Amino acid sequence: MLFDNHQLEKIKASETPLYYYDLNLLDETLEQAKRAADKRNFHVHYALKANFNDRVLSLIQSKGFGADCVSGNEVQKAIDMGFPADQITFAGVGKSDKEIILSLQHDIFAFNVESIQEMEVIDELAGKLGVVAKVSLRINPNVDANTHHYITTGLDENKFGVPTSELEHAAAVIREAKNVELVGLHFHVGSQITDLNVFKSLCVKVNEWKNWFEERGTQIKVLNVGGGLGVDYQHPDENPIPDFEAYFDIFDRFLERTAQQEVHFELGRALVAQCGSLITKVLYTKSGVKKHFLVVDAGMTELMRPALYQAYHKIERVGDSEETPILYDVVGPICESSDCFGKEVPLPKSHRGDLIAIRTAGAYGEVMASRYNLRNEVRYLYSDTLNLSSSL
Ligand code: LLP
């Protein structure tokens, strides 16, 4: 990862650990995604859950993306950041009454409804407010995303969406409901999907279930196919921007639709992962009988993905070094053995005070931070202004 001298000086002068956001890379990523989507008249809602840092969000908002939210607070945040309410979707298996009411009051684009009971509750709450709720029915299509089992969502054993065996019942409930309008069908099969064939299989299922509804006289205006496009954690410098053309092209070619039917996406990771790095300082070096350890000042409290999913993040030295490489286990200060960012990572022989970058940390990094061990709130730094501030 390359920093110019000015940036390097600023980083060196800052308190670590910190998230460093390359806003130029984010800008270019958003441009490419928007261009590829607009060309096909596709609508992209950015999944706030991946990163809701203010500067990141405001750049995304300024490019004309919609927002995909999974809590009332995210809906409120999206509105506060200027995302138009009619481009906000609200998903999640456990929406509380308060969150539903807030979203109804803002007249959001659509609720992605995950169960029949939720549909009934939304109908009732909308009735009480005297409004009509726009809903998309989330169908669990039983498509294997070929990704980590913790981030697979579209299989029969997952908690998400309405199983296809329940669709007859769901359709009857929707017909009876006076205060909901079915605008679309929603699908999301998992995250960090790198095999584009998975999306092809998804298209086949979307076509099938859209036809199923249309044969029963229900017109579907919106086909929301979720998010899930993966990024290259191994080679962040060689592949900093996902191939949005290839991704959208799959849907363009394989989704059957009329000119009136809209296609919506909920991308998170693909838009923000590569622009963020976690910068951490070496506190101690120590050599055991079999291992060399680098004890750094960031832990699973700042970036939980390696501990939670055994996720790989590229780890590298910040700035040049003439030292010969050694294999290090890079560990944090938290009192858990799983607090390890990588095992046997080749890094130049390191010393107390050296800086390390943990790459591809812009998605599901800062947002999943915790205060466990009463750690500090997460700090961050942007590539342009380089103003250090506290996030929460
Ligand atoms: N739509 C729905 C309904 C979702 O559940 C998700 C992610 C997205 C969209 C955005 O997916 P993306 O484009 O970012 O793949 N914490 C995990 C990832 C959890 C993803 C949850 N749902 C990780 O660090 O890998």
Image (tube, rainbow, N blue to C red):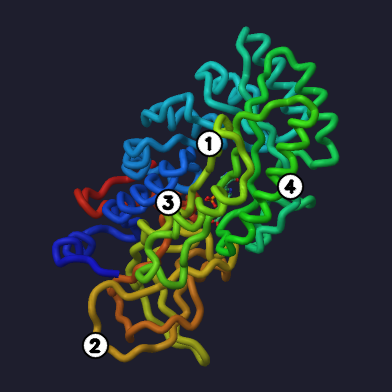
Query: Which sits in the foreground, 236 or 20?
Result: 236
Q: CA distance from mark 3 to mark 2?
A: 35 Å
- The amino acid beneath tag 1 is Cys
Q: CA distance from mark 4 to mark 3?
A: 25 Å
What residue did someone put label 3 on? 271
Which numbered mark, 3 or 1, is in the foreground of this view?
3
Q: Residues within 10 Å of mark 4 (few under 14, many from 20)?
A: many
Question: Which label was assigned to residue 141?
Answer: 4
Is label 1 in a helix, a strand or a loop? Answer: strand
Which numbered mark, 3 or 2, is in the foreground of this view?
3
Q: Is residue 247 above or below residue 194?
A: above
- The amino acid beneath tag 3 is Leu
What residue did someone put label 1 on? 69
Which numbered mark, 2 or 4, is in the foreground of this view?
4
Residue at 42 percent of width and 72 percent of height: 235
- The amino acid beneath tag 4 is Pro
Across and down, in percent, residue 284 comes to 37, 76
